[in-house]
Image (tube, grey):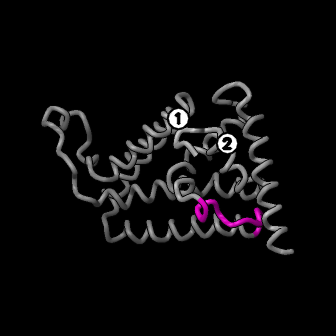
Amino acid sequence: MSLLDLEKHFAFYGSYHSNPINIVIHVFLVWPILFTALLFLYFTPPIFSPSQTLLNYIPSVLIFNFGFFYAVFYALFYVALDVKAGSFVALLTLLCWAGSSFVANSIGFELAWKVVLGAQLFCWSGQIFGHLVFEKRAPAFLDNLSQAFLMAPFFVILEILQTTIGYEPYPGFETKVKARTDANIKAWKAKQQKKLA
């Protein structure tokens, strides 16, 4: 699977997220995972220090550390997947980095790690619950870690854009993805039937 093949990735994602309740659970729980991961990474040491000129224009709370590069990597990857939706999701990702930096700076490490731990446990448990109870299928991260850690934030927003405004990265995208998703689900069900036989 090509890293930038949006159609294949979204079909793979869709085959693990076809139940409406499970989709809603992911819509509400995926982005807090990214936000709190960035909040935790705020406490990593700076990788570089900006010039004094640049420091005059940015708040001192924004540190160019591992969290910053994590957010930039995600943002660039999302733009590479699809320029329009990817740019929007990239902006959201960078806003999460900035927002998490301000929160982390104001609450400090002693409270931040507890907030991060609680939020991560709650959000991951909620998603696993959604898969086991409503989707009746194990989460995608068991088959593809990049889905859980890299692509899920993008796909949640892409799904919202498709549902609310009918957005497609290109004409026919939704139809092609649905056909692939249905084929993936059919293949998975056939595999499950063989295991039971």
Q: Nearer the viewer, residue 69 or 116?
A: 69
Residue at the location (80% across, 67% down)?
Answer: 192
Q: Which residues are magenta?
A: 133-143
Left or right: residue 70 versus residue 156 is: left
The quarter holding residue 132 reads bottom right
- Spot the residue most to the top: 171
Residue 120 position within the rendered picture, expressed as x and y whole percent measured from the top left: 50, 66
Residue 124 position within the rendered picture, expressed as x and y whole percent measured from the top left: 57, 66
Residue 14 position within the rendered picture, expressed as x and y whole percent measured from the top left: 71, 49
Q: Nearer the viewer, residue 95 or 18?
A: 18
| Residue 76, label in figure | none
Kind of residue indicated by mark 1? Gly
Task: Tell me the CA gap for discs 1 and 2.
Answer: 12 Å
Residue at the location (46% across, 44% down)?
Answer: 93
Residue at the location (64% across, 51% down)?
Answer: 27
Q: Mark 1, residues whose alpha carbon is within 10 Å: few (<14), some, or many (≥20)?
A: many
Q: How many marks?
A: 2
Residue 83 position within the rendered picture, expressed as x and y whole percent measured from the top left: 52, 29
Q: N-terminal of the two: label 1 or label 2?
A: 1
Magenta stretch contains residue 67: no
The quarter holding residue 24 reads bottom right
Cβ atoms at labels 1 and 2 below 8 Å apart? no
Question: Considering the numbered disc 1 on the image, is that residue within a helix, a strand or a loop?
Answer: helix
Residue with the mark numbered 2 = 159
Kind of residue indicated by mark 2? Glu
Question: Considering the numbered disc 2 on the image, is that residue within a helix, a strand or a loop?
Answer: helix
Q: Mark 2, residues whose alpha carbon is within 10 Å: few (<14), some, or many (≥20)?
A: some
| Residue 86, label in figure | 1
Left or right: residue 38 versus residue 183 is: left
Q: Which part of the image, by quadrant, shows the C terminus? A: bottom right
Residue at the location (49% across, 71% down)?
Answer: 118
